[in-house]
């Protein structure tokens, strides 16, 4: 069940009183940096997966070439 607009305003006021404006700003900045870091690591992980696939394909091509060279002998 979603809280209505009045309940959200009450929650926001309570959070503002507990933490203060400056601390909320710091928390928001830290949260933003954490999200940026997460997105960056996800992007880097995808790039690493692509690199691993390329290495596997290259290894397979090299292995196939070795097999062909030994078959000719």
Image (tube, helix red, strand yellow):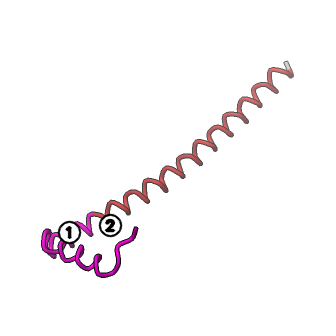
Side (left or right) of 39 relative to 20? right
On whether residue 16 falls in the magenta region, the answer is: yes
Give the magenta-colored segment's residue range: 1-30
65 or 3, which lies in front?
Answer: 3
In the rendered image, which quarter is residue 27 located in? Answer: bottom left
Which residue is outermost to the front?
1
9 or 64, which lies in front?
Answer: 9
Q: How many residues crowd mark 2 within 10 Å: few (<14), some (14–19), many (20+)?
A: few
Q: Which residue is mark 2?
A: 32
20 or 37, which lies in front?
Answer: 20
25 or 14, which lies in front?
Answer: 14
Circle 2 SS class: helix
Q: Which residue is mark 1?
A: 26
Residue sitting at 82 percent across and 27 percent down? 68
Residue 19 lies, in percent from the top left, at: 14, 69
Residue 69 lies, in percent from the top left, at: 80, 25
Quadrant where the C terminus is found in the figure:
top right
Residue sitting at 84 percent across and 21 percent down? 71
Side (left or right) of 41 relative to 51? left
Establish if 6 lies above or below 14.
below
Quadrant where the N terminus is found in the figure:
bottom left
Label 1 – label 2 distance at C-alpha:
10 Å
Which residue is outermost to the top?
73
Residue 47 lies, in percent from the top left, at: 54, 52
Side (left or right) of 56 relative to 11? right
Establish if 25 lies above or below 59.
below
Residue sitting at 17 percent across and 74 percent down? 16
């Amino acid at each position: 069940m979603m809280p209505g607009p009045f309940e959200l305003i009450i929650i926001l006021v309570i959070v503002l009183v507990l933490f203060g404006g400056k601390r909320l700003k710091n928390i928001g900045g830290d949260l933003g940096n954490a999200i940026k870091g997460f997105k960056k690591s996800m992007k880097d992980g995808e790039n690493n997966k692509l690199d691993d696939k390329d290495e596997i394909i290259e290894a397979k091509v090299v292995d196939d070439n070795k097999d062909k060279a030994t078959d000719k002998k």
